[in-house]
Image (tube, rainbow, N blue to C red):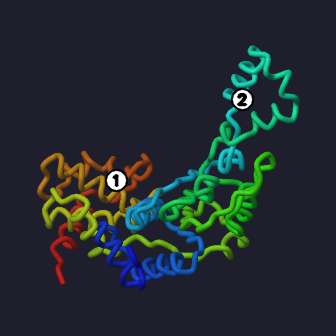
Amino acid sequence: MSLQSVADVRSALDANNYLASDGLATAVFLAMSLNRPLLLEGEAGVGKTELAKVLATIRNSELIRLQCYEGIDAAQAMYDWDYSRQLLHLRTLEATGEASSLGADKLEGQLYSEKFLIRRALLRAIDQHEGTSPVLLIDEIDRADDEFEAYLLEVLSDFQITIPELGTYKATTPPLVVLTSNRTRDVHDALKRRCLYHWVEHPDFEREVEIVRRRVPQVNELLARQVSAAVEALRKMQLYKPPGVAETIDWATALGRLGVRELDESVVQATLGTVLKYREDHERVRNSGVAGLVKQAFERGLYND
């Protein structure tokens, strides 16, 4: 699909049930047209990861996901060697007597060849020669440590990886890179300078209603509005983990499965675990009054421009 303008990007995302703000659609367009990585920050559940998945669908390209975590290193992100297969190959050569005839250099050349190379996410994204370049999703970069950020910065600078035994792999067409962060810690300035940046907000009320209607078509309009209104109220309660769009969709899906047509106190009490995932948040909501939450949902849900 040819995306020649911000409007084209917004329309393509909309066609895949991703309702982006003007700012986010603009950031995506610039990332694609300028070949720059896009760093998305925001609360968990606002649709950062989902955006990368939708972009891969729009571009009809592969989505390659690198999930970051504490302690991740270059070998786990770039490449590694299949040591068990190398050992098996070596024992086979020894058993047949070929090992002694090959000599050390040729034997090493066989063991450290592409046959035994394990391509991790970054190498897979760079070593692409056919079709549309992939979307490389580097998810939750804030969970990785400083050393890994340094590796990543080097890779994103030149889109190449050097393997001492094999040489340098360089992308013929750089992948579309999307990095996400829940901001559990600040990403370093050097990496931010390499990227375009966008803070992903929770959607406004009407946009969240539309998201629910599209993603959970089995629920009626009134319930979609009430659920969105209730989640909007929950986000204002200074919870330990405010619900994101993903939790709104989960709640609406659960209510639809239960055959609920509209919210009431008993339904909210019984299904609160689909939208809030910490005991302290449950207690805060109950102490504030579930009846008040339902009342707000009814009043907000009935409002229509």
Depth check: give the residue in front, 277 or 4.
4
Depth check: give the residue in front, 83 or 294.
83
Q: Amino acid at mark 1?
A: Val
Q: Amino acid at mark 2?
A: Gln
Q: Residue at x 75, y 61 (%)?
A: 150
Q: Residue at x 30, y 67 (%)?
A: 17
- On the picture, is 176 further left or further right than 47? right
Q: Quadrant of the C terminus?
A: bottom left
- Reading the image, the residue beneath label 1 is 275
Mark 2 surroundings: few (<14), some (14-19) or many (≥20) residues within 10 A? some
**Disc 1 to disc 2, C-alpha distance:** 48 Å
Q: Secondary structure at mark 1?
A: loop
Can residue 206 be seen in this snapshot? yes
Q: Quadrant of the N terminus?
A: bottom left
Can residue 46 be seen in this snapshot? no
Give the image location of residue 53, x and y in percent: 42, 60
- Reading the image, the residue beneath label 2 is 86
- On the picture, is 121 further left or further right than 263? right
Give the image location of residue 229, x and y in percent: 26, 68
Mark 1 surroundings: few (<14), some (14-19) or many (≥20) residues within 10 A? many
Q: Residue at x 35, y 72 (%)?
A: 13
When the figure is inspected, residue 109 is found, relative to residue 98, above or below; the finding is below
Q: Nearer the viewer, mark 1 or mark 2?
A: 2
